[in-house]
Image (spheres, rainbow, N blue to C red):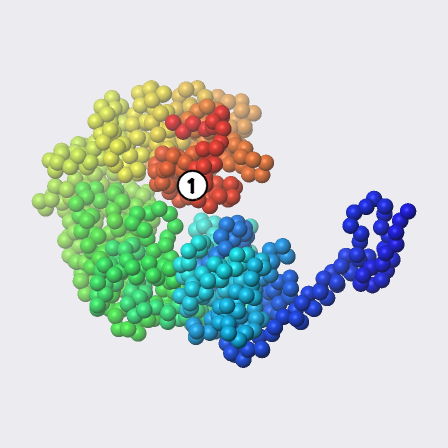
Amino acid sequence: MSRSRTCELCGAALTARPHGGRPARYCSNACRQRALRRRAAREDSRRPQSAASPAASSAGSSATSTAASSTAQGLVLPSALDSFVGRRQELSQLRTLLRASRLLTLTGAGGVGKTRLALEFAKGLTRRDGRVDLVELDSLHDAGLLAQSVAAALAVGERAGRSGVDVLVRAIGDTSRLLILDNCEHLAEPCARLTATLLSRCPRLRILATSREALRVPGEIVFRVGELSLPPADAGDDPVDLLRADAVRLFVERAASCAPGFTLQRGNGRTVAEICRRLDGLTLAIELAAGRAGTLPLSDILAGLDDQLSLLTDGSRTGPRRHSELAATIDWSHRLLEPAEQAVFRRLAVLVGGFDTAAAQTVCAGDGIAPPRILRILCALEAKSLIVRLPGDAQPARFRQLGAIRAYAMERLLASGELHITRQRALDWLNGLADRVGDEVFADQAAGPLTVERDNLAAALAACTTGHDGASHMRLALELARVHYQQEQPSAARTLLTGLLREADGRTLGGAVPALAARVACQQADLTQALRLGEQAVEWERTRNDPAGLANALDARAAAWLCRGEFAAAVVDLRACLDVVAVLGQPHDTAWCTHHLAWALLQAGEEREADVLMSRCLPLLREHAPWRRAAAALHTAGAVRLALGHLERAEELFAEVLRIVPEASFHALYPVEGLALVAAESGDMQRALRLYEASAQARRRLDTEPEAPWRRRLEHTATRARTRLSAAQRDAAVHGGRRLHGDRLVAYALRERGGDHRTTTDAVLVVDDQNTLTGREFMVAELVAEGLTNRQIGDRLGLSIRTVATHLDKVRDKLGMRSRTQIALWVAARPKDGRTSLR
């Protein structure tokens, strides 16, 4: 038998089958939802309104002007009229973090998108997460009315005998609720006190705050909202590649909304990408720039970014007033600074290429601000998101101002009348760094303290004239040319050096200028000019009593001889160079010059003497030289052993180079090519051709070529391999090589198979049913468990610090872990069978 019931909402008949279970109350899901909404409305009508308290009503009017109405199930959040772009990874991280802590604060620069991210996160919550309340604090300036403003936003009225905090605690009670406190920076201290009180007395309350600095409440997790991802500098103009960057996607979507029909194409891709880079991926700045697409061509928008604060205005009329123009957003943060913080903030504007603490102390101290105070002020500016720390484990840590923020700071510096004196301090600081380069014999080939200051050098030179301090200007121009040369930017270096050579007093720098110009001409394959400049450098230095300068000039002329293929002449110059350097008593410079002589002897067919010389210099360079010099010496030693027919030792040395150099660097291609030569001499022509094709493809992508003798040998080996292979074998090797790149190429070149000391990154280690780690990621996790820093892991695996950080981010995401301790515990719990050995 079955029993008949009726729907509690519409009265329609219900039939319950005799299998038992809870009887149905509604005839359909539509009736169920309508019933839920009616109950919610009844409960809402019983709740006290904010108008019950005049004080609460007046205090809350500004704080809740854009908050939407509440229901029993939660807040109906403001509906955005535009799409939400990117930040998917951040949303996932927020869900994890808010489960681990009851207070999560989103920090970041003004206009980076903290509020929008918080609202999108809240919209993704389910009914089981409880009620959501939004409290907007940007227009509240009286800290004493904070509790009343929050109460008004929650539609909670005051009661006689109870304070605002007590009313909030009683209203929230033990209900599950998420409270969003938006824009807390100008009320950081009162917000911190209120937050601590509410969390201690309301056990099921969670708080999500947005602020330009942390609240510093016990148990708080600070989540820094970074700038949107940008396309790499070599991304080209392929729309598919460019749209992988969130900043480009945001620009395209916002531009299309004001310029219907706007699309990203090969013709405009580079310009859009450069606009996004110039704006540092700052969300508000990109939206404002994209808003000009309806009235200005992209080229004019890009050109206008030289004056960002005047171009990026006229934001949404319906958005917060602080977002109506970019300058207002930054000015909001600037007004909250103490006078000393404001002074340091504006003086930092001259350091366009970033800075460390020592630079900031030299440039920004003075007028009552002692150098020891600078570090504390930098910490305060970073906490307030007015400077950002550059990614990576660089020591000392480096910071920078985002472009729009720096433009605002420069306006303030001009208005203060401090621009001239601040620029002079920057020049003095750069000249101090140049003094430290003076002790280097081969300064052109050594990465000194000015290597990371390229943009600061360029800005300092552009801001001063030669007439003001000609010697200082020439010296800094030489240092900037050195940096350009080391970073393989020969055209920029040559322009600077040509100007120095034309100076009437150009000889004051001795042969350093023509010597560097000779090396630059070698980079550009201008071999006649290279030799002429090398001879000029030696001639100038022979008139001076400076052995170090003469050694450098001889080395530069030898480089020109080598590029021209005149190896005997290069050997003569390098023997003379070694005699000069040996007198100076500097072992590292002697070892470096010995290595150069060994390379020249190898090219001249004197492999045995080259081998003897390398046995003398390699131990010192391997253990104590920077990685670039160590890698070059190891490569030379490998090439010498290859010429002598010691193939196994040659392969070991080339493999050692590959573990030292960063994977993304062109330096990694030389050991790959060396291993191709070893494979050919060993008779493995398929492996030789595969490695050659992989390296050739990478060189085309990086637009770099090896030295002529090395290139000729590689091409000869590739031709020999093609003739000895069948058509099928040749095609398989070529296609296989073109598919090798990055980790896969390194793994193949190092023969990382099975039980070797490292596992090929093509292999995947199973973590559980949902997450997987590659072999390289698993190795990074194991080294984290051993307590190594990112720098030590990079040294162990032969990776750059940035690559280690990328692998570590992937490990965290795949395992759902946020700390190194959690990763170490996970590794310790893994079964030992089959784990990758790193020793």
Q: In the image shown, does 344 or 340 lie closer to the viewer? A: 340
In depth, the one of 298 and 119 nearer the eye is: 119
Q: Is residue 587 left or right of residue 396?
A: left
Q: How many marks?
A: 1
Q: Residue furthest left?
A: 545
| Residue at 28% in and 67% down | 340
Give the class, few, some or many, for how many residues have Cα within 10 Å of label 1's Cα (few <14, many ≥20): few
In this picture, residue 442 sits left or right of residue 760 = left
Q: Decide if residue 733 is on the left or right side of residue 784.
A: right
Residue under numbered circle 1: 821
Q: Picture quarter containing residue 653?
A: top left
Q: Say whether residue 281 is visible.
A: no
Amino acid at the residue labelled 1: Thr
Q: Quadrant of residue 356?
A: bottom left
Q: Residue furthest right?
A: 1
Q: Position of residue 318 (x, y in %)?
A: 55, 73
* As drawn, 189 above or below 85: below
Q: Kindly identify the residue that appears in the image at 37 percent across and 37 percent down.
A: 787
